[in-house]
């Protein structure tokens, strides 16, 4: 019997990626896995993008550069 692909515990995504928009990815992920915590990262602090990310279900919004300990604590706080 084939095993089902496992869902990650948390997903971190950049908001700007080559050929893909992080907010569009967030929307797709939340449709398929509504309970999956998604953290959106960006080097381009943009209030509109942050608000949009939260409205689409992002767990949090992490501006770059970020402190690695802060990022780890944020990931751990997802559960």
Image (cartoon, rainbow, N blue to C red):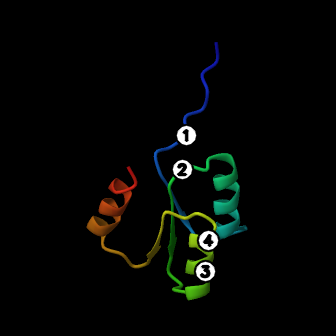
Work out whether mark 3 precedes mark 2 in sequence or the reverse, and give the earlier one.
2
> Residue at point 61% right, 85% down?
48
**Left or right position of 33 against 42:** right
**Left or right position of 21 against 7:** right
Please say if 7 is above or below 25.
above
Q: CA distance from mark 3 to mark 2?
A: 20 Å
Label of residue 20 in the image = none
Q: Give the secondary structure at mark 4.
A: helix
Mark 1 or mark 4, whichever is nearer to me: 4
> Residue at point 50% right, 43% down?
8
Disc 4: which residue: 55
Disc 1: which residue: 7
> Residue at point 30% right, 68% down?
70
Work out whether mark 1 precedes mark 3 in sequence or the reverse, and give the earlier one.
1
Q: Give the secondary structure at mark 2.
A: loop
Q: CA distance from mark 4 to mark 3?
A: 10 Å
- Contact? badges 3 and 2 (CB < 8 Å): no
Work out whether residue 47 can be spotted.
yes
Please say if 70 is above or below 6.
below
Label of residue 49 in the image = 3
């Amino acid at each position: 019997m084939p095993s089902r692909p496992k869902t990650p515990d948390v997903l971190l995504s950049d908001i700007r990626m080559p050929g893909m928009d992080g907010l569009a990815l967030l929307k797709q992920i939340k449709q398929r896995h509504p309970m999956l915590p998604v953290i959106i990262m960006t080097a381009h602090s943009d209030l509109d993008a942050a608000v949009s990310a939260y409205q689409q279900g992002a767990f949090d919004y992490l501006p770059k550069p970020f402190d690695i300990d802060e990022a780890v604590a944020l990931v751990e706080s997802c559960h």
